[in-house]
Amino acid sequence: MSGLYFMADVHISPVTVAVLVAQGYDVIRTTELLPTNAPDSEILELARVTGKVVLTQDLDFSMLVALSNHGLPSLITLRLSSVEPDRVAQRLLDVLPTIATELGAGAAITVSDNSVRIRKLPIQRSDI
């Protein structure tokens, strides 16, 4: 739908992934590509070389992306008050169309219940 490809880590429910796929988004879970215990750094590297945007609720990814000094992969970190899969999916469906350009250019985006914070990649040390 958006021309973007997403990789959802293990913290994103298969139900959320199914809702996004049903709405036309190209989303795959990391567990379809890597072992369930793959380190975050390996997930990020796979996303970078395959051109996928990482979807996660794991805050460790943000620091790894910031320290990597790479312009990709883009990252969406969800910080929502509910982890209920349908609510997470709905928030993503509301937000994804508004951030597609930034994701394509390389961004670390934090999505909360009422806001979206966008930081262009690579993140400068002064921004950390």
Image (cartoon, rainbow, N blue to C red):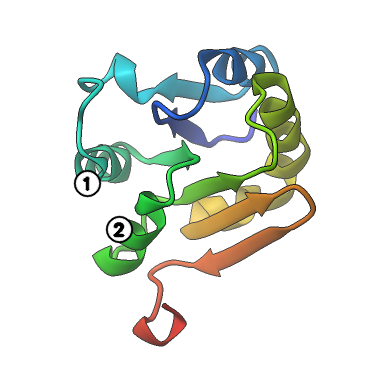
Label 1 sits on residue: 41
Q: Work out which residue is located at the far bottom of the displayed protein and give it.
A: 126
Residue visible at 68% across and 27% down in the picture: 89
- Residue 94 visible, this orientation: yes
* For residue 109, above or below residue 31: below
Mark identifier at residue 55: none
Horizontal and vertical percent for residue 80? 66, 43
Q: Is disc 1 in contact with disc 2, using a CB cutoff of under 8 Å?
A: yes
Residue visible at 75% across and 57% down in the picture: 115
**What is the three-letter code of the residue carrying label 2?**
Leu
Task: Name which of mark 1 and mark 2 comes first in the sequence.
Answer: 1
Mark identifier at residue 64: 2
Residue visible at 50% across and 23% down in the picture: 27
Q: Residues within 10 Å of mark 1 (few under 14, many from 20)?
A: some
**What is the three-letter code of the residue carrying label 1?**
Ser
- Badge 1 marks a residue whose secondary structure is helix
> Could you tell whether 55 is left or right of 19 in the image?
left
